Image: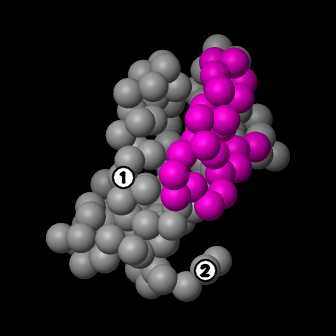
Amino acid sequence: MGLAHEGEPGWPRGEGAGVSATTRMRLSGRLVCASEEEDRLVRELLPAHIEATRAERGCLSFEVRPADEPLEWLVDEEFDSVGAFEAHQERMRASQWGRRTAGITRRYSIDWGDAPH
């Protein structure tokens, strides 16, 4: 298993990054809103984003819930393969959620490995 933070060396980017196509991917961390306006946007768009993600092929789990800290959200997601994770990332970036929340801070770590979590 490996652990990396988004944007750092070691963040997996497909099979060429030392992970196989069948490697399970688990992302966890926080979505950190800078304002009440961003938080309202998350609350507005989140239900459709959760529904679309959970319907994706290879999505094993997807949870986003308010953190104890105001304006923060806990994010936990797991996919059965690198390919499923990458397809999710592509769909997410092109979606209304991805476009409208792109400026909200994300503090994610990713764990990958063949063993279930």
Q: Is residue 84 left or right of residue 51?
A: left
Dot 2: element:
loop
Q: Is residue 31 above or below residue 23?
A: above
- At x 48%, y 72%, the residue is 24
Q: Which mark is residue 117?
A: none
Question: Would residue 57 be found to the left or right of residue 51 on screen?
Answer: left
The answer to whether residue 93 is magenta is no
- Residue density around tag 2, few if under 14, some if 14–19, many if 20 or more, within 10 Å: few
Mark 2 lies on residue: 116
* Closer-to-camera residue (31/62): 62
Label 2 amino acid?
Pro
Q: Residue at x 31, y 66 (%)?
A: 12
Picture residue at 52% right of the left edge, 25% below the top: 97
Distance, label 2 to label 1, CA atoms, is 19 Å
Q: Is residue 89 left or right of residue 39?
A: left
**64 in magenta:** yes
Say which residue appears at 46% left-offset and 80% top-offset: 113
Instruction: Report the span colored magenta.
Output: 41-65
What residue sits right under mark 1 in the picture?
86
Amino acid type, residue under disc 1 in the picture: Glu
